[in-house]
Amino acid sequence: MIHLFTSSAPNYIGKVRALCQSLREHCPAMTIHWLVADVRNQTLVDNLDEESIDEILFVDDFEPCRDRGWLFQHDMVELSTAVKPEAALALLAREDCDLLLYFDPDIVVFSPLDDLLAELRSASIVLTPHLLQPEQELDAVLDHELCSLRHGVFNLGFFGVRDCEEGAAFLQWWRERCRTFCWGDWRAGVFTDQKWVNFAPVFFRGTSILRSPRFNFAPWNINQRRLTGTFDEGFLVDDEPLGFYHFTGFDSGAHHQVIHKYAAGNQAAAMLIQWYEHRTRFLTPAEEIPWMLGTFDNGKQITAEQRKIYRERPDLQTAFPDPYRTSEDELCYQRWFRYTAPVEYPELLGGNGATEEAS
């Protein structure tokens, strides 16, 4: 049996629904899981009326991910990626799982994936690179090739693993790296879970690189591939049926900027973007579902600086094993940060003494 999962915080529910509905249409035999990058929220489970999702998982369903100090060190994107190999190992270990696929929540499938599955049945791991050929223009080299060097040759918005010894070994190795180094810090040589997988074709001989242009079509390769078609006729990439499109950077506006630069006037691309904007808005609940790991237990928002300093200080991790916990009667990490961090990190926090922003 084929299992598939996606991973995101609750704020991506509209995108998750769009992905899973497209999977149910084109890959109806798959068992589909949503890994929510948050502690269990029964309200979310009770109110998610989505027939295309077979199972909802949370990070605290996995014992290694229950460490409150470890959870605190990751922002929303980092956590959504750090838990991927942990969940993949657990799903691949199920007796009925022969093949396991992962898709980012901002992907939509547009046609059956039989050729992709056939490739995975003869490999251990399948990956898709950001680029399939060298860039020719300097702007594209700067935007796409250098970006791939910074963030990873392969796009981990998709991967596939077969239930075999090498597939499991890959996930175990990747889990250990993500457990310790899943940070969004390309200047330090890492980029969440993604850049580690540059090693996969070297370390694991059963790695197959999917080179069909119809897979992981995205803004970073739209200048290299020809997109045509409509919803009525179907979309084609270099005359092949569009397999799946990656709407990366959609909310930030980056998606629109790259399309405008490299595919201005492409009616098929404009149609996909307009459809996705309306589709995800329609599938997003009117009431926002909070990210429970985004705040201290008193409701105060956790800042990037609070996560960074905690992550870099083993002494603080020892002193405050549950940094989410707050107290007015005893020292907790939030109070330490409010009164001590501005003194120890004036260059980061901009001054001495307590600050309201750090409270």
Image (cartoon, rainbow, N blue to C red):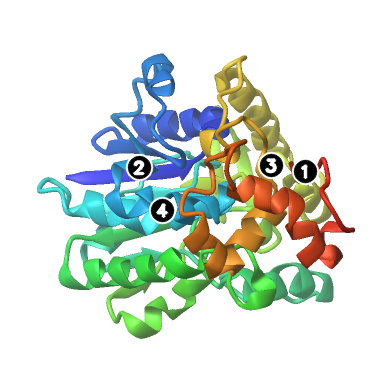
Q: Cβ–Cβ below 8 Å for labels 4 and 3? A: no
Q: Which of marks 2 and 4 is in front?
A: 2
| Residue depicted at 16% across the width and 66% down the height | 164
Which image quadrant for residue 309?
Answer: bottom right
Label 3 crowd (10 A; few <14 / some 14-19 / many >=20): some
Q: Residue 250 carries which label?
A: 3
Amino acid type, callout 1: Gly
Q: Mark 1 to mark 4: distance in Å?
A: 26 Å
| Residue depicted at 23% across the width and 61% down the height | 162
* Mark 1 or 2, nearer chain start: 2
The N terminus, quarter of image: top left
Q: Which of marks 1 and 2 is in front?
A: 2
Q: Residue 83 carries which label?
A: 4
Residue marked by disc 1: 253
Q: Position of residue 18 (x, y in %)?
A: 50, 30
Q: Nearer the viewer, mark 3 or mark 2?
A: 2
Secondary element type, mark 1? loop
Amino acid type, callout 2: Asp
Secondary element type, mark 3? loop
Amino acid type, callout 3: Phe
Which image quadrant for residue 350?
Answer: bottom right
> In the image, is residue 54 above or below residue 204?
above
Q: Mark 1 to mark 2: distance in Å?
A: 32 Å
Label 1 crowd (10 A; few <14 / some 14-19 / many >=20): few
| Residue depicted at 59% across the width and 68% down the height | 313
* Mark 1 or 4, nearer chain start: 4
Amino acid type, callout 4: Val
Q: Which mark is residue 60?
A: 2
